[in-house]
Amino acid sequence: MAIRYTLWLDPDDTPRHRAVEAELERYFIARFADYPHIRLFGADPYDYDAPFNRLHDVLMARAGEYCEREWRYVPSPEQLNRAFFLAVGHSNKFVRDEDDGDPHRPGP
C-alpha cells in the first residue's frame, strides 16, 4: 500500500497542513449546522449504532473526499479526527447525556 497522506509525503509544509486542518474544522462545524441538536453518547460510548458515532463515520468519509477534491490534499486519519473533535468542542449543536462517563462533570 502506497503512502498517500499529504502530511506524510511533505511533512515540512507546516503552513499548508495547518491551513487545511483549520479548513477541516470549519467544514465540520458547517456540516453540524445541517443537523438538529446531536446528543452525545451516554453510558456506552462504544455503541457504534448511536447517532453520534454514525455521524462521525459519515462525516469523516465525506471530509476526506472533500479535501481531496477541493484542495488536492489527502488528510491523515489523525488530522481528520482531530479536526472533527475540535469542531465538536466549538459547536453549540451537541448535547451531553447526564450519564456520559465524564468523572469531572458535576452530577444532577
Image: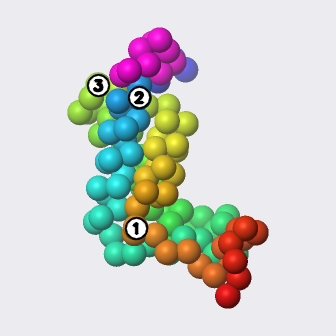
Q: Which mark is residue 18?
A: 2
Taking the image as shown, residue 7 lies to the left or right of residue 44, namely: left
Residue 89: image location, x then y, percent: 49, 57
Query: Which residue is labeled 3 in the image?
Result: 72
67 to 51, vertically: above or below = above
Question: Visible in this render: residue 44?
Answer: no
| Residue 9 part of the magenta-drawn span | yes
104 to 81, vertically: above or below = below
Q: Main secondary structure of the magenta part?
A: helix
Q: Rounded to the nearest whole Å, what is the CA distance between mark 3 and mark 1? A: 30 Å
The label nearer to you, 2 versus 3, is 2
Residue 105: image location, x then y, percent: 68, 72
Q: Earlier in the sequence, mark 1 or mark 2?
A: 2
Query: Which residue is labeled 1 in the image?
Result: 92
Of all residues, the one furthest to the bottom in this rendering is 108
The secondary element bearing badge 2 is classed as helix
